[in-house]
Amino acid sequence: MILSDREILKSIHKGDIVIEPFREDCLGTNSYDVHLGRFLAVYKDRVLDAKAHNKTEELVIPPEGFVIQPGTLYLGVTEEYTETHAHVPFLEGKSSVGRLGIDIHATAGKGDVGFCNTWTLEISCVQPVRVYAGMPIGQLIYFTLDGDVNNYYNKKQNAKYTQRTLKPMESMMWKNKF
């Protein structure tokens, strides 16, 4: 079941959901709008290696915006820091963003109970698009969880994305054993 606007607000007041900064005008009927932060990153190498720590180059979106290009994966970040302690958060793109030909996540739309951080976005586009820091980029949808949780993300010893950051995080696949 998806939380309604009223249930999202109740969960915020209980501390089960944290959104910083929280703006009530970003609360939709059953979602919360998140915004593109000012930092982007691109991988330095054209060929990425799943077993290696692939280095990134940081980009800062200037006030006049930044044109993203097809064929390049941009790592972006939400302005909003979130915590989710009793629900499963899903990040989806806004339809207005999709209509510009922008995808905001390649595969990682679902968060875990206990995820506490900004959201790294895996941004790609089908044609050049100028993007701006602060523009609405996606929406968080919260699902109720059936049953108790034994393994909260922020308490897992092998959780890779727990360091609070204002910048996008590159893939940590290289930390896996395979």
Image (cartoon, rainbow, N blue to C red):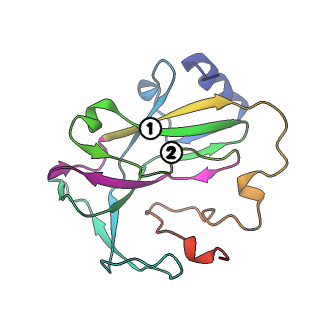
The magenta segment: 114-135
- Measuring from the top left, give residue 20's x and y in whole percent: 53, 43
Expressed as whole percent of the image width and height from the top left, the position of residue 49 reads 45, 79
> Are the residues flagged by discs 2 and 1 in contact, CB closer than 8 Å?
yes
Residue at figure coordinates x 72%, y 41% from the top left: 85
Circle 1 residue = 92
Residue wearing tag 2: 109
Please tell me which residue is depicted at 16% across the width and 49% down the height of the picture. 129
Give the class, few, some or many, for how many residues have Cα within 10 Å of label 1's Cα (few <14, many ≥20): many
Between 49 and 10, the one lying in front of the other is 49
Quarter assignment of residue 66: bottom left
Q: Residue at x 15, y 50 (%)?
A: 127
Residue 115 location (% of width, % of height): 64, 50
Mark 2 or 1 closer to N-term?
Answer: 1
From the image, which quarter does the N terminus lie in? top right
**Residue 177: x %, y % from top left:** 67, 77
